[in-house]
Amino acid sequence: MNKELLEALNILEKENNISKDTLLEAIENSLLTACKNHFGKADNVKVTMNRDTCDFSVYAEKEVVEEVEDPLLQISLAEAKMTDPKYDVGDIVQCPIDSKKFGRIATQNAKNVILQKIREEGRKALYNDWYCQEKEVVTGIVQRYLGKNVSINLGKVDAILNEAEMVKGEVFKATERIKVYVLEVKDTPKGPRISASRTHPDLVKRLFESEVAEVKDGTVEMKAIAREAGSRTKIAVKSNDQNVDPVGACVGLNGARVNAIVNELRGEKIDIINWDDNPAYLIENALSPAKVICVVADEDSKEAQVIVPDYQLSLAIGKEGQNARLAARLTGYKIDIKSETQAREMGLFEELGLDYQEDGGYEDYESDYQEDGDTEYQEDYQEDDQEDYQDGGLEEDSLEEDSQEK
C-alpha cells in the first residue's frame, strides 16, 4: 500500500507539478482530521511519516496518572507500566492509534482533505506557470466561439480571446492553430484565467524575437513599434553591431523572415525602418516609402514640419492618413506634412531658410541642432522620375517600395 502511495505521489508531482512534500503534509493533516472526527479531540494526536517510504504512524500522547479522568488525554500508571516498566506518574506515553478503526465518515473526510489540497496545489502550480508567460506569445488551438469571443486551448488551461482583442474581420475555425499574446493572467478559484490578444503591438515584437536570431540575442534592437492591427505595422530597428544591417536581418533572405510573420498575421503589412537618434532623420525614415525634401523637428514641443514633393504628398499621408499616423505614433512627434507647392505658397522655404535653386533642387547641408532647439534636415532633391506618378499623387498601396515593406 505504501509503495502504491509513493508511486501515486511521484506521478502527481511529475504531471501536475505539485511538490511531494506538500502532498505528504496534506496526508498528515487529513489523518489528524480523521482522528479529531473519530475521537472528538486531536490536540494530543501526532502523525509521523517517512518521506522516502511513505510509512506512517499515528499516536496519541497521554499523561501517566494514578486515576484516569479523561481517557483521551490520560493513561493509568498500571497500563503504562504494562507497556514499559520505566514509566512513572507525570510521564508522557505515546499510544499507537490504529487508523483502520476510523469510521467511514472520518475516512471520507480525510480523503476529501487530500483531494482538496491536490486541487489547490494544482491550480497554484498552473497559475505560477502561466504567470511567468504573461506578455509572451504562445500557440493555441481554437476550440469554439463563446458569443463573439473565442476560446483557445493552451494545453492544461484555456484562454479567452475577447472581441476587442481580435483583428477586425479575422475569423477562426475550430482546431485551427494560432499564435496569441498573453495579455493577463488572473488567479481565480477555478484556476488561472488567461486573457489573450491578437492586436497588441508586442505580438509583432515577440514574433520577430522568435523568428529573428539577431533580435532575440540583442544584436538588433527594436526601438519603437506602431501598429494598426490587421492593416499595417511600422517598426524602427537599430543594430548594436556595425557589421549587421538591422533592416536586412529582420527582412531575411528573399524576405523569408518577415514573410513568415506576415503570414502569421494574415497579410498584415510590415514596414521596417532604421532608427536614428536624430529625430529629423527618424521622421524621414518613418514616412517611408515616401520621399522627403525637408524635415524640421522641434524637440521641446514634439512637433515636426515636413515638406515632400507634390507627387509624394498622398503617399506620405497614406490611405486615410495611415502612413502619417503610424509615423507620428512611431516617433512620438506631431507631424505636419506639406507639399512643395503648399510650402512655397506659405513661404515655408524662406521661413526655414532654405535656398531654392533653379535646377529644381535645394541646397544640401548637414542636419544640425539649431539654437532654438529645432532639428533641420534637408535632402538634395531633384524633380525626376515624375513620369511614374500623376499630379497630386496616387494611392499609397500602388507606390510602396519592396525594400521597406514586406
Image (cartoon, rainbow, N blue to C red):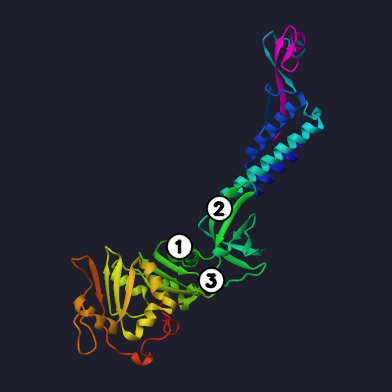
| Left or right: 215 as drawn, with respect to 198 | left
Residue interval drawn in magenta? 51-79
**Mark 3 neighbour class, 10 Å CA radius: few under 14, some 14 to 19, many 20 or more:** many
**Mark 2 neighbour class, 10 Å CA radius: few under 14, some 14 to 19, many 20 or more:** many
Q: Which residue is drawn at the image coordinates 33% and 80% (left, top)? A: 291
Disc 3: which residue:
265
Numbered disc in front, either 1 or 3: 3
State which quarter of the image contains the N terminus. top right
Contact (Cβ within 8 Å) of mark 1 with mark 3: no
Residue at the outermost top position: 66
Q: Is residue 173 above or below residue 130?
A: below
Disc 1: which residue:
216
Numbered disc in front, either 2 or 1: 2
In this rendering, does residue 242 appear at all?
no
Residue at the outermost front position: 346
Q: Amino acid at mark 1?
A: Lys
| Residue 329 occupies quadrant | bottom left
Circle 1: element type = helix
Give the image location of residue 175, x and y in percent.
Answer: 67, 67
Give the image location of residue 111, x and y in percent.
Answer: 74, 37
Comparing 372 with 156, the one in front is 372
Q: Is residue 71 magenta?
A: yes
Q: Give the mark nearer the N terminus: 3 vs 2.
A: 2
Disc marking residue 185 = 2
Q: Give the mark nearer the N terminus: 1 vs 3.
A: 1
Q: Give the mark nearer the N terminus: 2 vs 1.
A: 2
Q: Amino acid at mark 2?
A: Val
Q: Amino acid at mark 3?
A: Leu
